[in-house]
Image: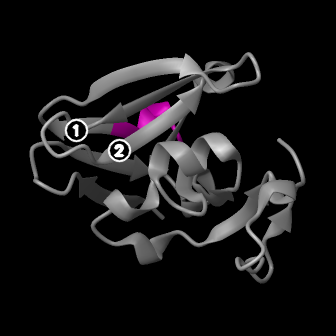
Amino acid sequence: MVVSVDGGCFCGSVRYHVELTSSDEAHGSLCHCRNCKKAYGGGFMTAVKIPISCFSYSKGNAKVHAMDNGSGVLVTREFCDMCGSSILEYPESTKETHRFITLGTLDDPTKFEPVYEIFTKDRLNWVSPVPGARQRAKL
């Protein structure tokens, strides 16, 4: 069953479309690493991993920023340069294959529940594990 979703930034300058052949192609996740906390300004980052072939911008262009995530891995983040909303990110290892869309930018973020959490060793003590999600202390 085809799954079609749309999303975009807070101000509406950047919009995107995702067309999956199956919901099995997407995986919701939480990342508790320090870099995601810094980049997204929260206790963790919530994202949906999708194949790059399923993603396209439908309005505007995202600004691109890449930097070392602190462990020698280059991470690229794309965001709206008007309102600052984070749209997606990807590490160098998935540059050609996948994107991690920030869950809150989806028009309907209820479609993708987290199936795993990473860097749980860095989880804040007031954040509970997601019931049923796989837990990984590191990547």
Q: CA distance from mark 2 to mark 1?
A: 7 Å
Residue at figure coordinates x 86%, y 63% from the top left: 135
Question: Is residue 139 highlighted in magenta?
Answer: no
According to the image, label 2 marks what residue? 87
Instruction: Tell which of 101 and 75 is nearer to you.
Output: 75
Give the percent coordinates (x, y) of residue 80: 22, 38
Give the percent coordinates (x, y) of residue 75: 57, 25
Question: Is residue 50 highlighted in magenta?
Answer: yes
Q: Is residue 93 above or below residue 13?
A: above
Give the percent coordinates (x, y) of residue 68: 62, 19
Count neighbours of disc 2 (C-alpha within 10 A) and say few if under 14, some if 14 to 19, many if 20 or more: many
Question: Residue 77: which quarter of the image?
Answer: top left
Residue at figure coordinates x 80%, y 79% from the top left: 132
Give the percent coordinates (x, y) of residue 108: 33, 72
For badge 1, the amino acid type reads Cys
According to the image, label 1 marks what residue? 80
Which disc number belongs to residue 112? none
Secondary element under disc 2, as helix, strand or loop, is strand
Instruction: Tell which of 63 and 5 is nearer to you.
Output: 63
Magenta residues (range)? 49-55
